Image (cartoon, rainbow, N blue to C red):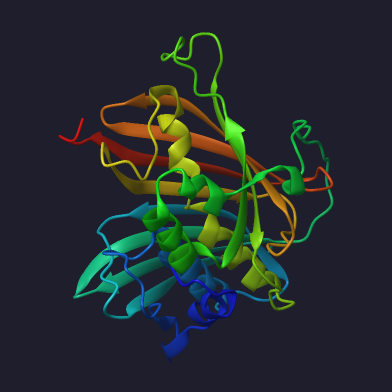
């Protein structure tokens, strides 16, 4: 993942090869051994959005991560026009490298319509200014972790609020697992709804699976855990401004079979429920215990 927001924006600028066929570039200088899942998801969404009329906006994504992506070569995105209805549009995107499909996405788009509205209330949490910089959290693991964070993830400003990892309730009988943070793009994004949608999709994959490790006292970056995103779903409820503060209110209802399930509500700073996200991922124990 690139350290600068301008590089992230560059990753979202896909090259059109043919009708419905796009090529996405890779960040330069990354130390990651496989492509960040959020990058594939964001580029796939950009490819789909480029085939949909501007007045139709994404309201749901369903993603499957099939193979780890190779960061040394571009990714080709093949957009299938599944349906264009009077109100809804459906697209399916296959991401390919080395002649194999590494990722699938199904996305649905809708024209703007009026209807009933309700939403959950935003929880009472500290403000971004009163939350902890992620670089400071990384500092607890040493300077190498800080340097890695700044080199790979500085394109977004992330502030950690905290979690409720308790040692006396590992099965979460009494209190559900909760992890919360604020995030926003580290700079100003173009005035484009499709770019904001893609930028949000990009960062939504970064921390969510970690909520499933809260009851077990582990972290995604631990050598005791082999993590990987398996599937990822986003429901977009209201327009997103990804360069303004968003609260990522994460919970984990279950972990079993070396897989963890996490869900999250995403609120704007003024309390609007912007999106709901869910992810199942691999949280396999390693031999380093």
At 46% from the left edge and 43% from the top edge, which residue is drawn?
140
Location of the N terminus (image quadrant): bottom left
Direction front: furthest residue: 143
- Nearest the camera: 220 or 228? 220
Location of the C terminus (image quadrant): top left
Q: Position of residue 68 (x, y in %)?
A: 26, 60
At 55% from the left edge and 75% from the top edge, which residue is drawn?
4
- Nearest the camera: 117 or 35? 35
199 left or right, relative to 75: right
Q: Position of residue 88 (x, y in %)?
A: 63, 60
At 27% from the left edge and 80% from the top edge, which residue is drawn?
73
Q: Is residue 155 visible?
A: yes
Looking at the image, residue 21 lies above or below residue 69: below
- Nearest the camera: 75 or 85? 75
Examine the image and state in which quarter residue 44 appears.
bottom left
- Nearest the camera: 195 or 149? 149
Q: Position of residue 173 (x, y in %)?
A: 49, 9
Q: Is residue 92 visible?
A: no
Q: Position of residue 255 (x, y in %)?
A: 37, 26
Q: How many numbered marks are there?
A: 0
At 36% from the left edge and 72% from the top edge, which residue is drawn?
30
117 left or right, relative to 36: right
Examine the image and state in which quarter residue 218 appears.
top left
Examine the image and state in which quarter residue 287 appears.
top left
Looking at the image, residue 204 lies above or below residue 90: above
Looking at the image, residue 25 lies above or below residue 66: below
Looking at the image, residue 18 lies above or below residue 64: below
126 left or right, relative to 164: right
């Amino acid at each position: 993942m690139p350290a600068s927001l301008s590089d992230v924006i560059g990753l979202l600028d896909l090259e059109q090869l043919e009708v419905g066929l796009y090529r996405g570039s890779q960040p330069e200088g990354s130390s990651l051994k496989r492509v960040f899942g959020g990058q594939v998801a964001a580029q796939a969404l950009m490819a789909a959005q480029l085939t949909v009329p501007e007045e139709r906006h994404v309201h749901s994504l369903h993603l499957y991560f099939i193979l780890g992506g190779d960061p040394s070569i571009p990714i080709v995105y093949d957009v299938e026009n599944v349906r264009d209805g009077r109100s809804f549009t459906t697209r399916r995107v296959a991401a390919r490298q080395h002649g194999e499909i590494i990722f699938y996405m199904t996305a649905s788009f809708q024209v703007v319509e009026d209807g009933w509205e309700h939403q959950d209330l935003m929880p009472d949490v500290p403000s971004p200014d009163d939350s902890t910089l992620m670089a400071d959290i990384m500092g607890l693991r040493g300077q190498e972790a800080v340097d890695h964070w700044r080199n790979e993830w500085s394109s977004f400003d992330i502030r950690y609020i905290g979690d409720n990892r308790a040692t006396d309730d590992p099965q979460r009988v009494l209190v559900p697992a909760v992890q919360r943070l604020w995030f926003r793009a580290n700079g100003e994004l173009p005035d484009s709804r499709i770019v904001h949608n893609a930028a949000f999709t990009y960062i939504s994959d970064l921390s969510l699976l970690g909520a499933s490790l809260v009851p077990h006292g582990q972290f995604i970056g631990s050598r005791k855990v082999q993590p990987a995103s398996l599937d990822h779903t986003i429901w977009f409820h209201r327009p997103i401004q990804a360069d303004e503060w968003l609260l990522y209110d994460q919970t984990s209802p279950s972990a079993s079979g070396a897989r963890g399930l996490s869900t999250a509500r995403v609120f704007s700073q003024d309390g609007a429920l912007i999106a709901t996200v869910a992810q199942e991922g691999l949280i396999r124990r390693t031999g380093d215990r």
